[in-house]
Amino acid sequence: MTSGAQPEVQPRPQKRILSAGHNPALLRVRNSLIETAGYHVVTTRESELLLDLLARQQFDAVVLCSSIPAPIQENIARQMRASNTKTPLIIICSQHDQERLRGLASEIVLAEHGVSQPLVEAISKVAGE
């Protein structure tokens, strides 16, 4: 005979996303979207600080906003690769910069297509959801 007691379910830890961009308004909107999807977001508007945060803390993915110019996105991606980080990188960029950045990122999300659903899907894919 069973006691009818339900096993205790432990909540899964929230995945941590490092979100970087130069435009505060875009960051607020994108971060709100990411948080609504159930992720914990750490934000920086300083491109240089991103690599320091990545070295000191554990993240499940990094998102580079389209407000960061493509040459800086490319530099960040190359530095991440050189540091041997295993953290997946998602770059939001224009269609014009897509080919330039494709080989450097785990996922590319095109800014022109609207990023809401594609961004959440990309995060889910690379963060192991």
Image (cartoon, rainbow, N blue to C red):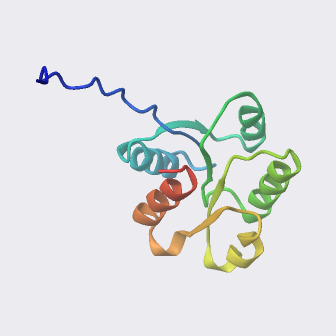
- Image side of residue 116 versus residue 98, left or right: left
The x, y position of residue 72, in whole percent, is 78, 57
Quarter that holds the N terminus: top left
Q: How many marks do you count on the picture?
A: 0
Which residue is located at x 39 percent, y 42 percent? 38
Which residue is located at x 28 percent, y 23 percent? 8
Which residue is located at x 26 percent, y 25 percent? 7
Which residue is located at x 74 percent, y 58 percent? 73
- Image side of residue 101 versus residue 119, left or right: right
In the rendered view, tell whether residue 28 sits above or below residue 114: above
The x, y position of residue 87, in whole percent, is 69, 46
Residue 24 visible in the snapshot: yes
Q: Residue furthest right?
A: 82
- Image side of residue 118 versus residue 8, left or right: right
Q: Quadrant of residue 70?
A: bottom right
Q: Quadrant of residue 65?
A: bottom right
In the rendered view, tell whether residue 100 sits above or below residue 64: below
- Image side of residue 45 versus residue 51, left or right: left
